[in-house]
Image: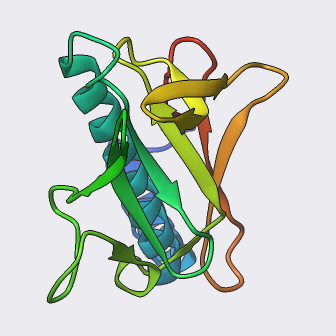
Amino acid sequence: MRRPSGFTIVEIIVVLLLMSILAATIIGRSITSSDLDLNSATDKIRNQIRFAQSQAMKRTNTTSGVWGIRSDGNSEYWMFRATSTGTEEVRIPGGDYGATGTRISFDSLGANLNEFTLVFDWLGRPYKAQTLGVPSSPVTTANSQTISVSKGTEPPRSITITPETGLIR
């Protein structure tokens, strides 16, 4: 009697099991720890920008509702609250400040940022600057805001701020 052609269920299961073990091994080796560190740093900065935006949106008027984040592009970044007399640096929750201060070092972040100033008004709209507590230079399609996060030889990650809505991607 002739056996029907095809694979048995046991043969299919064995092949799928071997393929899954091989795929897990290849994927596990292709993701480096520096990739994970850079992704983590990018997510951390993105969340801190969202925090500054939420702080601005909690305020109900233009005089106390201007918050932002600034990077000097060299060694540190910080969050600030703008007032009619200047700016006041504010500690970001979960920031690694070391012993003192309100600025976060790029060393503790494990990455570098380009120089930028990002300000949010009390409606959460993004701006590139502020003068005496009044936002100026709004983020527009023609005047966009992209923050670059880099580390070593890894390709940089970008954080994009959407005009008008302030969506942070």
* Rendered position, 65 above or below 86: above
Residue 6 position by quadrant = top right
Residue at point 23% right, 31% down? 55
Instruction: Give coordinates of residue 3: x percent, y percent.
Output: 49, 39
- The answer to whether 93 is drawn above or below residue 49 in the figure is below
Task: Compare residues 132 and 57 and report the one nearer the observer.
Answer: 132
Which residue is at the front of the view, 16 or 135? Answer: 135
Observer able to see residue 58: yes
Which residue lies at the image location 63% right of the left edge and 18% below the top edge? 163
Is residue 44 visible in the rendered structure shown here? no
- Quarter of the view holding residue 21: bottom left
Residue displayed at 22% across by 56% down: 92
| Snapshot colouring | rainbow
How far from the left and from the top, in percent, is residue 115? 65, 62
Q: Is residue 129 above or below residue 59?
A: below
Asked whether 143 or 150 is in front, the reply is 143
Q: Residue at x 58, y 12 (%)?
A: 164
Is 120 positioned to the left or the right of 161 in the image? Answer: left
Left or right, 45 with reference to 48: right
Q: Is residue 87 above or below residue 3?
A: below
Left or right: 103 as drawn, with respect to 167: left
Instruction: Give the percent coordinates (x, y) of residue 161.
Output: 58, 31
